[in-house]
Image: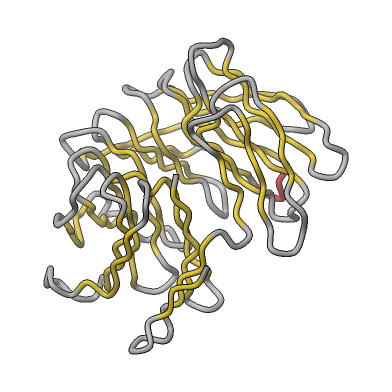
């Protein structure tokens, strides 16, 4: 399904095109790709998050409900084999892949982030002050950015084993995103406000932009490789703003879904956005 703006042809919105879709209302997870058949697999918990590996051969996912323990699972799409990796004491809120897909990372409501080496089968845990709702771990994979329920954003250096934080919100932060160069980070949550922050030193924690004309809690957010920010949540809308402009009425595009937005991402090659709602 494609939504195209004739006046702004560079904004083409593609729905459900090559995304791993993880349903928060069932114990089933499905992988959809426009080139391959659908893969469906089961999980002992409600699935909260999942990521496809760069070579598109494996999926890492995790979640939670009232069952224990809470395991991060790596599913091989070819062999259909499941590998259970790091284990958390509380539900798993976010997962991701590391360098060359050799390690995975997971965040949990147990106030920890875990990096699991798949080959060596070793776990390295990092402790935080509040439940971790979302995280960012990008190349060169030396720093972790974590968003917590207490409104703080943490920057953890995994080589120096040091961490620093700033108060980004007064309420829980549900979603964060950074540019590819990790120059700035966008965050949104229960306060219904999206803010963009500078995360370069010595400007770490300096606010750049703010968008507060949102009708519900923020559940998903993504920064483009250029100067756009897209976000959505409980009000069933997708908002796209040009970060170079300060005026609140400079909304580039807004789309409404039938249900709340649980995830979205930019397609870098063609300035497209692939989105899905739960």
Q: Is residue 20 visible?
A: yes
Position of 174 relative to 32 (above/below): above
Coloring scheme used? secondary structure
The location of residue 258, given as percent across then percent down, is 37, 52
Residue appearing at x 20%, y 61% in the figure: 208
Query: If the image is split into quadrants, where does the C terminus sit?
Result: top left
Residue 41 in which image quadrant: top right
- Between residues 221 and 136, which one lies in front from this camera angle? 221
Position of 133 relative to 186 (above/below): above
Residue appearing at x 69%, y 55% in the figure: 54
Residue 51 in which image quadrant: top right
The location of residue 24, given as percent across then percent down, is 49, 34
Answer with left or right where residue 72 lies relative to residue 131: right
- Between residues 35 and 169, which one lies in front from this camera angle? 35
Answer with left or right where residue 232 lies relative to residue 263: left
- Between residues 23 and 187, which one lies in front from this camera angle? 23
Answer with left or right where residue 264 lies relative to residue 96: left
- Between residues 73 and 124, which one lies in front from this camera angle? 73
Residue found farthest to the right: 79
Residue appearing at x 41%, y 42% in the figure: 145
Residue appearing at x 15%, y 55% in the figure: 212
Q: Is residue 176 visible?
A: no
The location of residue 60, given as percent across then percent down, is 65, 38
Position of 243 relative to 232 (above/below): below
The location of residue 115, given as percent across then percent down, is 59, 31
């Amino acid at each position: 399904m494609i939504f195209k703006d004739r006046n702004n042809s560079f904004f083409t919105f593609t729905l459900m095109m090559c995304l791993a879709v993880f349903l928060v209302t069932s114990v089933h997870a499905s992988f959809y790709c426009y080139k391959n058949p659908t893969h469906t697999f089961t999980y002992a918990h409600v699935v909260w998050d999942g990521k496809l590996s760069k070579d598109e051969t494996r999926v890492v996912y995790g979640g939670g409900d009232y069952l224990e323990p809470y395991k991060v699972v790596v599913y091989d799409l070819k062999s259909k084999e499941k590998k259970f990796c790091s284990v958390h004491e509380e539900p798993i809120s976010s997962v991701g892949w590391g360098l060359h897909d050799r390690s995975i990372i997971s965040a949990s409501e147990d106030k920890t982030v875990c990096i699991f080496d798949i080959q060596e089968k070793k776990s390295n845990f990092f402790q935080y002050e509040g439940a971790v709702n979302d995280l960012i771990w990008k190349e060169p994979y030396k720093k972790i950015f974590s968003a917590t329920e207490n409104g703080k954003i943490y920057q953890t250096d995994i080589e120096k084993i040091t961490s620093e934080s700033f108060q980004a919100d007064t309420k829980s932060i549900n979603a964060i995103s950074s540019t590819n160069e990790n120059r700035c980070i966008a965050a949104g949550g229960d306060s219904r406000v999206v803010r963009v922050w500078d995360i370069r030193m010595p400007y770490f924690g300096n606010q750049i932009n703010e968008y507060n004309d949102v009708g519900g809690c923020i559940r998903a957010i993504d920064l483009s490789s250029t100067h756009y920010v897209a976000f959505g949540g409980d009000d069933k809308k997708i908002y796209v703003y040009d970060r170079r402009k300060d005026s609140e009425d400079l909304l580039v595009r807004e789309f409404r879904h039938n249900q709340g937005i649980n995830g979205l991402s930019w397609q870098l090659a063609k300035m497209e956005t692939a989105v899905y709602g739960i």
